[in-house]
Image: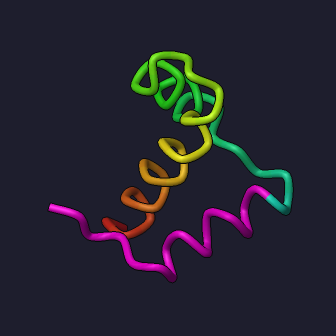
């Protein structure tokens, strides 16, 4: 079940703009996206937003 809202996605974008990126989560996004460069950012955004929503 998706818990993240647009506010959570916005928080992730702000983190990235501030230069904060969870490297471990980024690597997970790379694996889940099949290393397709255009999908890595989207998958990271989704994973991080869900983590923020759960906390």
Q: Which of the 4 image quarters holds residue 1?
A: bottom left
Q: Residue at x 54, y 53 (%)?
A: 45
19 displayed left or right of 55:
right
2 displayed left or right of 48:
left
Residue 19 spot, x, y in % from top left:
85, 52
Q: Residue at x 61, y 42 (%)?
A: 41
Q: Residue at x 31, y 65 (%)?
A: 54
Judge whether 39 appears above or below 6 on screen.
above
Q: Quadrant of the C terminus?
A: bottom left
Residue 35 spot, x, y in % from top left:
55, 17
Residue 9: in magenta span: yes
What residue occupies the far bottom of the structure in this picture?
Answer: 7
Residue closest to the eye, 43 or 28: 43
Residue 21 spot, x, y in % from top left:
70, 44
Q: How is the image coloured?
A: rainbow
Residue 10 spot, x, y in % from top left:
61, 75
Residue 3: in magenta span: yes
What residue occupies the far left of the structure in this picture?
Answer: 1
Q: Which of the 4 image quarters holds residue 18?
A: bottom right
Q: Main secondary structure of the magenta part?
A: helix
Magenta part of the chain:
1-16
Q: How many marks?
A: 0
Q: Residue at x 42, y 48 (%)?
A: 47
Residue closest to the eye, 49 or 22: 49
Judge whether 44 appears above or below 18 on screen.
above
């Amino acid at each position: 079940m998706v818990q993240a809202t647009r506010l959570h996605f916005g928080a992730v974008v702000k983190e990235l703009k501030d230069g904060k990126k969870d490297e471990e989560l980024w690597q997970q996004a790379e694996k889940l996206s099949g290393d397709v460069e255009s999908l890595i950012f989207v998958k990271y955004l989704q994973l991080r937003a869900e983590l923020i929503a759960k906390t």
